[in-house]
Amino acid sequence: MLSAKSLFQEILANDESFALFCSIAASGESQGGWENARIAALVPESERELAPKITRHGADEDKHGRIFNALMKKRGLDPVPVPPETDYTMLLEKNGIGLAHEQLGRDEPLAVQDIVTYLSHSRVTEQRASEQMDLLRKHFADDPDIGRAVKQISNDEDNHLAYCHEELLRFAYAGHGRAIQRTLRECALAEIRIYRDVSLAVMANMGRILGWSKAKSAVLAAGIHAMYVYERLGGWRRMVSLEMPERRDALGGPASAAPEFA
C-alpha cells in the first residue's frame, strides 16, 4: 500500500533520489535566503523595525540550504542539477508571485505595499512549507540520519508562519486589510497550481530514478491531481486566513545554529 511514509523511505534510501530531493530543497531554501536578504536591505524607512525579522527569515532559509547540503555530504554525495520544472521558488517568481527578482536587484527602496505583497506571499508559501515539514517530522523525527534536521527545519517553518500571521494582522489593522485579502487569494490560487505541477515533475523524476511502474506512477499522479482539486474547491482557504499566533515575535531574535552532522 502506498503511503507518504513509504514513498519518503524509498526516496531517502536511494542515493540518486536522495541527492535530487536534497538538491531541490537546498536550491529553494538558498533562493529564499537571497530574496529575504534583499528585501531586508530595501525595506522602506517607515518599516525599518521589520528589517531584523526579515533578515532572520533569510538567515533561517540559508541555514536550511546548508543543512540539506550537509545531509548529502554526510552520505558522500554531491548536489545535482535541479530540473527547471521542479524549481518551485523560481516558478513562483516567473508567475508573478511575490516580488520580482529584477526589482530586488535594484538599489531602490521598496514601498509599504511591496512589504505587504512579500508578507502575503510568504504567508502562503510558509503554510505549505510548515505542512510539508510537519509531515516529515511525524514520520522521521527519530530517524538517526535526518531526524535532527527535520525537527530544526520544521520548528523554523512554524516560526516563519507565525511571523507572517502577526505582521499581516498588524498591517491589516493599519488599513491594508483589503489589499492583503486580495493578494493572499491571488497568491494561494497560483501557488496550488504551481505546487501541483512541481509535485508531478518531482514524482516523474523520482519514478525514473527508482524505476517505478506505470501503474504506480499513475496512482501517484492521480493523488496529486486529487489534492489539487480539493485545494481548488476550497482547501486554498487555509492559506489565506489570519489569526494571532501562539508564537508571538517568533523572529524577534537571532537565527539558531544549524545542527552538526558527523
Image (spheres, helix red, strand yellow):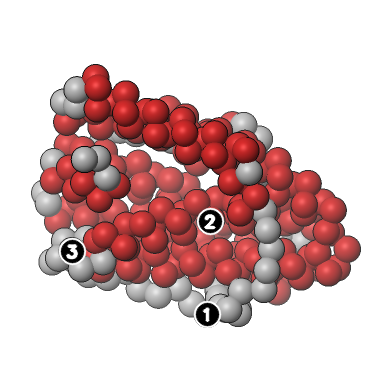
Foreground of the two, 118 or 111: 118
Q: Amino acid at mark 3?
A: Asp
Q: Amino acid at mark 2?
A: Glu
Foreground of the two, 147 or 254: 147
Q: Nearer the viewer, mark 1 or mark 2?
A: 2
Please provide percent x and percent y for residue 134.
39, 61
Q: Amino acid at mark 1?
A: Gly
Mark drawn on residue 143: 3
Please provide percent x and percent y for residue 113.
80, 53
Please provide percent x and percent y for residue 151.
32, 68
Determine the secondary structure under disc 2. helix
Q: Residue at x 16, y 26 (%)?
A: 211
Horizontal relation, residue 120 to residue 171: left or right = left
Foreground of the two, 131 or 65: 131
Horizontal relation, residue 190 to residue 179: left or right = left
User: What is the CA distance from the residue labelled 2 to the residue labelled 3?
Assistant: 24 Å
Q: Residue furthest top?
A: 214
* Residue 102 visible at all: no
Quadrant, the C terminus: bottom left
Determine the secondary structure under disc 1. loop
Q: Dot 2, how many residues are within 10 Å of its Cα: few (below 14), some (14-19), or many (20+)?
A: many
User: What is the CA distance from the residue labelled 3 to the residue labelled 1?
Assistant: 29 Å
Quadrant, the N terminus: top left
Quarter of image, res 78: top left
Q: Nearer the viewer, mark 3 or mark 1?
A: 3
Determine the secondary structure under disc 3. loop
- The residue carrying mark 2 is 126
